[in-house]
Amino acid sequence: MNELMQYDENARPATRAEAADPPALWRQVRANIVAIVSVFVALGGLTYNTWRNERTEANRSTRIAAFEVLKTLGELQLVVDYAYYRKDRARGDATIGWTRVQCIKDLATILPSPGPEDAERLLQTWRTSVETLETDPQGAAKISDAIYATRQDLVAIIQHLR
């Protein structure tokens, strides 16, 4: 019984000053608040920088593809004009046109909508109108209209890049 009755210094009631003392975790947070805020700022900056770099690369890829498609659309329009207006079989060769249309379709896969849809529409228009391109004014007009519509949409895509 003697052991149970002994006085334990650690079991004494807390004084008012000890009761108002914040817990150890809170004291550590207050002592290291600058370091904690710095970690959050660094993580936020790293996250934003990573997102910005990815967005910039996507915009760069889209911009390059759109300009290449615009350039190829101009070349395709030349093929159409030489074939229909000048009746120049060397410069208005349908084979050259096919390679331009396929290049446009391939590059358009990188572009956001409506780029791929326009390229598919241009391919279908070319496919249905190329055989009579030299003689049919409506065929040449359909292809030229599809080229123009694709060009307009590409310019809008480039303008909306951020």
Image (spheres, helix red, strand yellow):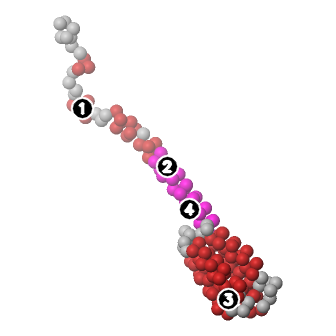
Is 32 left or right of 87, judged from the image as shown?
left
Of the residues tagged 1 and 3, which is closer to the observer? 3
> As shown in the figure, which amino acid type bears the numbered disc 2?
Leu
Mark 1 and mark 3: span between their CA atoms? 91 Å
Q: Earlier in the sequence, mark 4 or mark 3?
A: 4
* Mark in the foreground, 2 or 4: 4
Query: Between residues 19 and 78, which one lies in front from this camera angle?
Result: 78
Question: Is label 3 or label 2 in front?
Answer: 3
Within-10-Å neighbours for mark 4: few <14, some 14–19, many 20+? some
Provide the residue designation for mark 1: 19
Residue 154 appears in the rendering: no
Closer to us: mark 2 or mark 1? 2
Decide which of tag 4 and tag 1 comes sooner along the chain: 1
Circle 2: element type: helix
Q: Identify the residue under disc 4.
A: 55
Q: Quadrant of the C terminus?
A: bottom right
